[in-house]
């Protein structure tokens, strides 16, 4: 009785929501290597003939602002390790009567030449991100994604129940059963791969649910924020003097590749990651004083969202983690089509034969 119920749930969860999981997985696999794909699609924006390991922060920002046509400070700056790669400078620009535009500018770090710009929502990566993030539906899409993630979790757990050997003969259950029958061969691939990738698929699914609706996992009123945008404490208008900030980086000899900078215009804080004396360092710079802010001696709080994001994107395990997450995005297509074949052949076998 219980097995019949779990088989029913597993079958119909897979058949009804499976195609959605296929599309979600493939878009996720794309996003793992979106930077490489973007570089292949638009090499002129991302690579230059010249090369250099150093850069001028203030000159890069000034060139990007002039090219984009704004005096607003950027949100983030990324200078890749590749000495020929252009700096990537992101802006969040207001548009009258329309949603804000996320514009990415590309600047050659050697001669500070503006190479061009992209509007994120008009790119292939932007399309994939918006689908994978909220199905183009904003907060409602987040909720749908979370519910579908729960369905995916049930699909995985019912699959585990159906795999579980009755007589606890795990040696037989964990081994590959050789067969020349294509139906049995297909079934064996579905069963075998499903078990050995279960932990990976649960990891990606559960972290995805958390990222979609993290407010479901917080219990204090202070932490519950739904979909509100989070930022630093508002301190009034902040003037960013990037020339002074650049001097701070020069004194620390931190203007070398690779480097990244995230700017919070609300609090006036800049989070810089770079290289100092051959090692990677991270510092905070106060825009008001153009000075490095020392780390607080207080115990740092655990950022659950950041941890879940790193797990979901594979950032905890460098290239191997990214490969695992890429593979996890391909697996739903594999499970959907092998599972569909199993259902289709059994359905045909139940049909009465006509002579």
Image (spheres, helix red, strand yellow):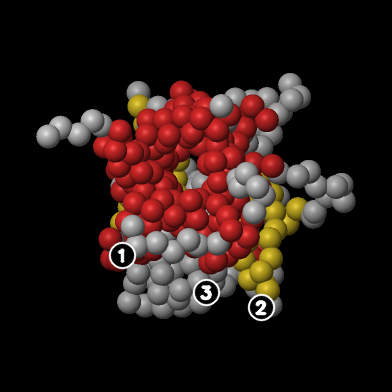
Task: Name the residue beneath numbered marker 1.
Answer: 40
Q: Is label 1 or label 3 in front?
A: 1
Task: Name the residue beneath numbered marker 2.
Answer: 278
Q: Which of 306 and 16 is in front in this view?
A: 16
Give residue 138's quadrant in the image: top left
Q: How far apart are marks 1 and 2 (CA)?
A: 30 Å
Residues packed near mark 1 inside 10 Å, few (<14), some (14 to 19) or many (20 plus): few
Secondary structure, mark 2, is loop
Q: How many marks?
A: 3
Q: Residue 117 carries which label?
A: none
Give residue 221's quadrant in the image: top right
Left/right of residue 198 with respect to residue 116 in the rendered view: right
Evaluate whether residue 224 shows in this view. yes
* Percent coordinates x, y for residue 287 in the rendering: 65, 48
The answer to whether residue 247 is above or below residue 242 is below
* Percent coordinates x, y for residue 68 in the rendering: 35, 48
Evaluate whether residue 237 shows in this view. no
Residues packed near mark 2 inside 10 Å, few (<14), some (14 to 19) or many (20 plus): few
The N terminus lies in which quarter of the figure? top right
Q: Are marks 3 and 2 in contact (CB under 8 Å)?
A: no
Residue at 32% from the left image edge and 56% from the top image edge: 182
Give residue 62's quadrant in the image: bottom left
Q: Distance between the residues labelled 3 and 2?
A: 13 Å
Q: Nearer the viewer, residue 145 or 78?
A: 145
Residue at 25% from the left image edge and 31% from the top image edge: 351
Task: Name the residue beneath numbered marker 3.
Answer: 54
Secondary structure, mark 3, is loop
Mark 3 or 2 closer to N-term? 3
Residue at 32% from the left image edge and 77% from the top image edge: 49
């Amino acid at each position: 009785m219980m097995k019949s119920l779990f088989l029913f749930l597993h079958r119909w969860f897979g058949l009804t929501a499976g195609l959605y999981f296929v599309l979600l997985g493939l878009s996720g696999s794309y996003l793992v290597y979106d930077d490489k794909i973007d570089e292949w699609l638009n090499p002129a924006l991302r690579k230059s003939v010249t090369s250099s390991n150093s850069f001028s922060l203030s000159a890069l920002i000034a060139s990007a602002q002039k090219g984009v046509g704004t005096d607003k400070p950027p949100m983030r700056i990324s200078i890749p390790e590749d000495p020929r790669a252009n700096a990537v400078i992101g802006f969040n620009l207001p548009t009258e009567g329309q949603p804000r535009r996320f514009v990415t500018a590309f600047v050659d770090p050697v001669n500070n030449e503006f190479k061009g710009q992209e509007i994120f929502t008009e790119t292939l990566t932007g399309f994939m991100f918006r689908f994978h993030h909220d199905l183009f539906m904003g907060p409602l899409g987040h909720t749908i994604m979370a519910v579908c993630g729960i369905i995916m979790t049930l699909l995985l757990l019912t699959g585990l129940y159906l795999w579980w050997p009755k007589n606890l003969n795990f040696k037989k259950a964990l081994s590959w059963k050789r067969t020349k029958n294509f139906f049995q061969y297909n079934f064996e691939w579905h069963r075998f791969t499903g078990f050995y990738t279960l932990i990976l698929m649960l990891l990606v699914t559960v972290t995805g649910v958390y990222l979609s609706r993290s407010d479901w996992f917080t219990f204090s009123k202070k932490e519950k924020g739904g979909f509100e945008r989070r930022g630093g404490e508002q301190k009034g208008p902040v003037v960013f003097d990037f020339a002074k900030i650049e001097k701070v980086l020069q004194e620390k000899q931190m203007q070398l590749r690779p480097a990244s900078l995230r700017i919070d215009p609300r609090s006036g804080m800049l989070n810089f990651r770079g290289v100092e004396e051959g090692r990677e360092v991270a510092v905070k710079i106060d825009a008001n004083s153009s000075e490095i802010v020392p780390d607080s001696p207080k115990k740092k709080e655990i950022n659950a969202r950041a941890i879940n994001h790193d797990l979901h994107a594979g950032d905890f395990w460098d290239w191997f983690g990214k490969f695992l997450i890429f593979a996890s995005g391909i697996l739903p297509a594999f499970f959907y089509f092998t599972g569909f074949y199993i259902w289709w052949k059994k359905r045909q076998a139940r049909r009465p034969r006509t002579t």
